[in-house]
Image: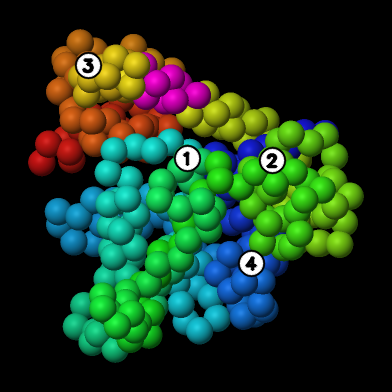
Amino acid sequence: MSFLSAQTEFGFKKIFASPQSKDILISFLNAMLYDAQPTIEDLEIIDPYAAPSVTGLKDTYLDVKAKITGNKTVIIEMQVINVEAFTKRVVYNAAKTYATQLRPREGYSKLNPLIALTITDFILFENTEKFFTHFVFKELQENFEYYNREIELVFVELPKFNKELEQVENIIQSWIYFIKNAPLFDEIPEKFASIPEIQTAFSIASRTNLTLKELEELEKREMFFEDQRGAIIKGMQEGRQEGLIEGQTGLILRLLRRRTGEIPPETKTRIRQLSLEQLEDLGEVLLDFTSQEDLIAWLESTSA
């Protein structure tokens, strides 16, 4: 038996947003947001894809979105690669999800608090050794909080968590250990025998429970992330923005060819004219393309 990684978009959604994942997500969020206290008693997993409702707004890509106890919304993103302006993207996704709660002509009193939980496989905050950080709005000099904690940003940085299995002490550390290390095991560790939600998470993550189509999709996602890592490393080695863009463009073209067939020269030219941020956006959506018409439509929307 082997287990898929929760560090891929496919794996994270499979484990935490499947129909049978409700208890798993409650346990995980109580651990991450409420110091393992049973604050969240119930939740509703909802469609994490937030299409823009206002002209000019970018699409929001999230891994999991849920309504929790207290009428709060939680959005979760698992990010493997530190892309340009990632910290701005976190704030944008949180602010947009908060703002788009309102329907036309509804008053601001209808807005409910939002928590954005971001898990990274890279170090985001160099100025602290803490692997877990929690941000709220506070007054700069007297340090008192803004009303109602309307927006909270929570981060888990996996590279800073270096405990071995025998050193794991609590449910918070158990969940982080699971996300970071599940693919290393051939069976469910005895350490987690007393935590039924993590046992269920391992069962969902078992590759033996995946369909052939899911295995193919997983392989594509894993290949994409490995290729993207290679493109970024190449750009860093060359030490130039142009090198990063060149590597990213080559990766995008290879993946598009696998998805939609040979790319016409004029379409390649349009792709090579994209900025690094636009290439990153294209990388987010291209695995959902089924034809070159999807690609052309995306390029048209980008240039509009």
- Main secondary structure of the magenta stretch: helix
Q: Earlier in the sequence, mark 3 or mark 1?
A: 1
Amino acid tagged 1: Phe
Amino acid tagged 4: Ala
Question: Crowding at label 3, few (<14), some or many (≥20) Cα neighbours within 10 Å?
Answer: few
Q: Could you tell me how far apart the alpha carbons at marks 4 and 3 are, in whole angstroms?
A: 46 Å
User: Which image quadrant for residue 172?
Assistant: bottom right
Residue at disc 2, secondary structure: helix
Residue at disc 1, secondary structure: loop
Residue at (66%, 77%) from the top-left corner? Answer: 37
Q: Are marks 1 and 4 in contact (CB under 8 Å)?
A: no
Residue at disc 3, secondary structure: helix
Say which residue label 2 marks.
181
Amino acid tagged 2: Asn
Q: Position of residue 107 (x, y in %)?
A: 23, 87
Say which residue label 3 marks.
268
**Residue 267: which disc?**
none
Say which residue label 1 marks.
122
Residue at (30%, 59%) from the top-left corner? Answer: 91
Q: Is residue 227 magenta?
A: yes
Q: Are marks 1 and 2 in contact (CB under 8 Å)?
A: no
Residue lying at the far left in this picture: please name it. 304
**In the rendered view, would you say 45 is above or below 158?**
below
